[in-house]
Image (cartoon, rainbow, N blue to C red):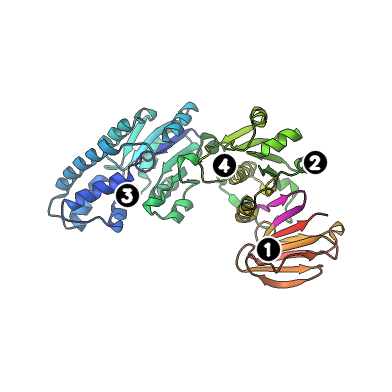
Amino acid sequence: MAIQAAIFDCDGTLLDTMDMWRNTTAQLLNSYGLELTKSLFDAIEPLTIVQTCDYIHTHCHVDASGDAVMQRFNEIIRNGYERSSVPLPGVCEFLQSLRAHGVRMVVASSTPKEHLEFALKRAGIFDFFERTFSTGGSIRSKEYPDIWEAAHTYLGTDASSTWVFEDTPFGVREAKAAKLNTVCIFDAHMQRDIETCKKFSDVFIHSYAELSYELLDDFEPLPDSCDVHQQGDLSDASADDVLSVLIVAGSPAPSSLKLVQKLARVNDYLIAADGGANVLYEAGIVPQVFCGDADSVNGDAYKWVTSCVEKKITFPREKYATDLQLALDCAVHEARRRRKLLHVTLTCASGGRADHALGVVGVLARAASYCPTIVEDSYTLQIISLRGRSHIHFAQTDIKKTVSVIALTPWTCISETGFKWNLSHYDLAQFSDEGISNVVEDSGATIVCHSGKAAVFIMHG
């Protein structure tokens, strides 16, 4: 869904000023012989400045009136912004990118308008924004959705194409209550409730290095009726209801061109995850999407893939998420757009580095509902769980193949029939070697996952 408008919080979202706010609040309290505690800061952070000063007057038993407290606080805030109005790393570049794509932008903050606009001007980013909004008066504190609704009403854009950028759990919660898309810029230093931040954010990041216009433009929200996305076992799903996506990753020891060509023919949608474009370039296979930070794709392949793909989603190299995770997100959004279930196959993903290979299995385990499969020249790996794929059936051609089952989570219960060593509702210990090197003996052999998650390795040859 194309992004048309952006509503930014200021402190901790645009400006690196959260330490300044802690220090100025502590300075105010110290002037009355009080100390700033985490619980007190958490209590006043969502409030308007008038409410904050009244709270300090009432709850901290300060002799000065709320108006007197506010007058002193305004002086301290102004001095703080004069010293500390610096944009967060990557903010200016991101704002420039949004402006280049015609995205309208406003700021919505608990900071009073006078201080807010002073800080934005001092930081050199004021001119990016059409208007600023501050809580107070008819706009209640950020414990309510008022400020997001006011900004959205002003913009007049469709809610599905309007994004809110916030760093606080209450901010993203109320932006979501206003039915807007949300990005949470999470700062671990602030010790916020990470689970609430994740719950109410459509995109969760630690820095602007993880964000791009292309990522937001590619985003597709869950449909109002989201049964299509709540994937269970796909065994009985019609082929017309499933989007089969092949992700070609950038392993330093890639799969053979013959295998990649074979997999490309039997999948509906093809994503090149960064260095995966090298293999596709050699194989002469054009993907629909290139996704990554371009740190492992060679020059010729990059020029080729970016000139012929339908969609290019690029990111800075200093990011938290891997290229594979970003490619998987891209696949999820495409399935949502088509209102289909998702089945993911991955190749060129596990050769060359053991740490990368283990990380890949971890990513796919978290995406178990999408029936993830790794296919390499020497083996196939399938994730089984109660959601996505709960069992694997083997055919006549699989007889004598070696199969290993490794539990990826605690409380993983497995049954194996038609093997040299059969199991019935057996509890496999997490990452134990008890399920290693079994052998298929019957054409009707089956592995069933009753609970937990497991990786099933099927060796070729």
The answer to which of 233 and 324 lies nearer the viewer is 324
Q: Residues within 10 Å of mark 4 (few under 14, many from 20)?
A: many
Relative to residue 8, is residue 276 drawn left or right? right
The residue that disc 2 covers is 258
Q: CA distance from mark 1 to mark 3?
A: 47 Å
Residue at the location (38% across, 51% down)? Answer: 189
Q: CA distance from mark 4 to mark 2?
A: 33 Å
Q: CA distance from mark 3 to mark 4?
A: 30 Å
Q: Which residues are magenta?
A: 370-382
From the viewer's perspective, is the residue at label 4 or at label 2 nearer?
2
Q: Is residue 179 visible?
A: no
Q: Residues within 10 Å of mark 1 (few under 14, many from 20)?
A: many
Quick one: which residue is furthest to the left in this view?
A: 63
Q: Earlier in the sequence, mark 1 or mark 3?
A: 3
The spot of residue 135 in percent (x, y) is 30, 42
Please say if 417 is above or below 77: below
> Residue flagged by tag 4: what amino acid is it?
Glu
Residue at the location (58% across, 49% down)? Answer: 225
The residue that disc 3 covers is 46
